[in-house]
Image (spheres, rainbow, N blue to C red):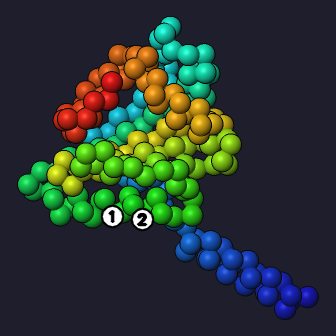
Amino acid sequence: MNKMIKTFSMLLFASLLLVACNKQPTIQEYYVQKQESNNFIAIDLPASLLKVGDEASQETKETMATIKKLNILAFKITEENKAEYEVESAEVKGILKGKKYNELMRMKHQNMNIIINYQGADEAINEFVLYAADNEKGFALARVLGNKMDPEKIMKMAQDLKNIDGEGASDAMAQITDLFGDIDFD
C-alpha cells in the first residue's frame, strides 16, 4: 500500500512538472508584461466605448454585442530600440505559432505584414489577435476579446468599421495612426 502511494505521488509530481514545463506564454501575458515599458503604447478599450452608428447593419450591431474588450499594444521603432524591436517581434510571432492560437489569415498591406489569429472553437471564438508589423515603423498587437464571436461576422463587420464611433476609440486610433502614419484606421 505504501509503495502504491509513493508510485502514485511520483506520477502526480511528474505530470505536474511536465505541465509546468510545457506552459506556453499567451498574448495576454505578453501584453501585461510589456504594457509598462517605455517602448510600448498600451490601450485598453471596453466595448462600451465602441458604439455602432445607426447607419450600421443589424448584423454589425449584433456582432459588436459579442465583443467585450479591445487591447492594443504598439511598439514604435526608434534609432535606439531597433535591436529590441527584432527581439520583441520574434517573441510575439513565437507566441502566435504556439498551439493555443489558430491562424485565420495573413496579408500584406503596403510595407506591413498582417497576421490574424484566434483562440477558441471555429464557430465560437473568444479572442482574436491581430499582429501588424512594419520593419521601418514598428508593430501593433490588438486583442479583441469577446464571447462566442463568429469569424465570418467579424470579417463582415471589419468592412463596416466606418460606422463605429466612440470618444475613447478615436483617441486610441489617433495614437496608433501616429505609429503607422500612412495607414487609415477610419
Q: Label 2 crowding class (10 Å Cα cut-off): few <14, some 14-19, many 20+?
A: few
Up the image or down, 114 lies above or below 22; here it is above
Mark drawn on residue 90: 1
Q: Label 1 crowding class (10 Å Cα cut-off): few <14, some 14-19, many 20+?
A: few
The outermost residue toward the top is: 54
Residue at image mark 2? 94
Up the image or down, 17 lies above or below 127; here it is below
Q: Residue, x 47% and y 16% (percent of image)? A: 51
Closer to the camera, 72 or 8?
72
Marks 1 & 2, CB-CB < 8 Å contact:
yes
Residue 175 appears in which quarter of the rendering? top left
Residue 130 appears in which quarter of the rendering? top left
Closer to the camera, 114 or 12?
114
Residue 122 appears left or right of 45? right
Residue 8 appears left or right of 136? right
The outermost residue toward the bottom is: 3
Closer to the camera, 157 or 27?
157
| Residue at disc 1, secondary structure | helix
**As shown in the figure, which amino acid type bears the numbered disc 2?**
Gly
Q: Is residue 160 visible?
A: yes
Q: Residue, x 28% and y 48% (percent of image)? A: 112
| Residue at disc 2, secondary structure | helix
Q: Residue, x 52% and y 35% (percent of image)? A: 155
Label 1, label 2: how many angstroms apart (C-alpha)?
A: 6 Å
